[in-house]
Amino acid sequence: MAGRPATRAASCRARATAGCWIAIVILSVTVAGGCNVNGALEQLSEARRLTAELLVQFTKAADAANRAVMADTDEASVAFAREAETNQRAVQRDIDALRPIVQGHYSPEAELLEAFVRQYAEYRVLDRRILDLAVENTNLKAQRLAFGPAQEAADSFRDALEAITPSIPAQDMWRGKALVATAISTVREIQVLQAPHIADADEAVMTRMESRMATSETAARTGLETLATLVPPASRARLAAATTALDRFMGLNAEIVGLSRRNTNVRSLALSLDQKRTLTATCESTLRQIQSALAKRGFTGTR
């Protein structure tokens, strides 16, 4: 009989020990489960943050590139192009940070991210082409030549010819005035054609304009040659000044036409408004799909 209390005591101790181990196991599982939950939520939160940052940086890059296209100075174009490149590097950093998170836990979002990566690669190629064109600013440079040095040369040509008119002999006065007026008007015709030439992107149209410019130049030079037979020797210096001014004007016109032919501003703007606009919208749509998918996830949505 004396052994029974000892047996009961041992049994109680065994049950207590077992209970302690069970409690320890439950506590360990609970703690581990809690750590897993917290870790998963942290990853989800970071994925959401990176996706939001990715969309912001992509939008900023596209906007800076558009401003490079629209800039009215070389300095501004270059500055905006550099800003776009800085934002693009930020986009790539966000991609590199987001990719391992979604690949390890969120398969649908990982597939969407890879789709964006492909779209973004295509975007980068197109955007690089646009920015390279934009910073050249050939149409803008042509415009400045047309409204600056070329305008001054044309005015000098006019002034030199008008100064000759009073010296023309009376018997040739009306003929001389007509030649002066024609020569001046033909140069003005070339000036009038410069602006639409700079703005046009159609090579056939530009070729026709250049043909008309050549015809006008021929008429102006023919007028000068005829005037040379009418004016007295004392006015030959002014006639030479008119010829020099015409030569300078036509040299500048050749520069304007060459810059206009390259059409970098017109081409970069056309690409931005057409292909790039469509591709930008596609990239933004994919990023928003990733955002939406991550927003719907909680801990139960992790794999």
Image (spheres, rainbow, N blue to C red):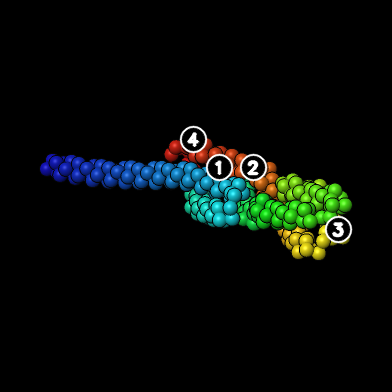
Query: Mark 4 against mark 2, which lies toward the viewer?
Result: 2
Check disc 1 and give the amino acid type.
Leu
Q: Which callout, 3 or 2, points to the residue nearer the camera?
A: 3
CA gap between label 4 and label 2 equals: 29 Å
Q: Badge 1 local density, few (<14 within 10 Å), some, or many (20+)?
A: many
Q: Amino acid at mark 2?
A: Arg
Q: How many C-alpha atoms fall within 10 Å of the one at disc 2: few (<14), some, or many (≥20)? A: some
- The earlier-in-sequence mark between 1 and 4 is 1
Image coordinates of residue 279 in percent, x first then y, are 64, 44
- Are the residues at dot 3 and dot 4 in contact (C-beta closer than 8 Å)? no
> What's the residue at 48%, 37% (across, down)?
295
- Element class at badge 2: helix
Q: Say which of 10 and 78 sits in front.
A: 78
CA distance for labels 3 and 1:
76 Å
Cβ atoms at labels 2 and 1 below 8 Å apart: no
In the rendered structure, which amino acid carries the disc numbered 4? Lys
* SS label for mark 1: helix
Which residue matches tag 4?
296
Residue corresponding to mark 1: 287
The residue lying at 82 percent from left, 49 percent from top is 177
The single residue placed furthest to the front in the displayed view is 170
Q: Which residue is mark 3?
A: 230
The amino acid on which the numbered mark 3 sits, given as a three-letter code, is Leu
Q: Identify the secondary structure beneath mark 3.
A: loop
Query: Which of the 4 image quadrants contains residue 5?
Result: top left
Question: Which of 247 and 279 lies nearest the eye of the viewer?
Answer: 247
**Residue under numbered circle 2:** 277
Is residue 96 visible from the viewing direction of this image? no
Q: Secondary structure at mark 4?
A: loop
Question: Is tag 2's residue or tag 1's residue first in the polypeptide sequence?
Answer: 2
Q: Of circles 2 and 1, which is in front?
A: 2
Residue 255 screen position, x and y as percent: 72, 59
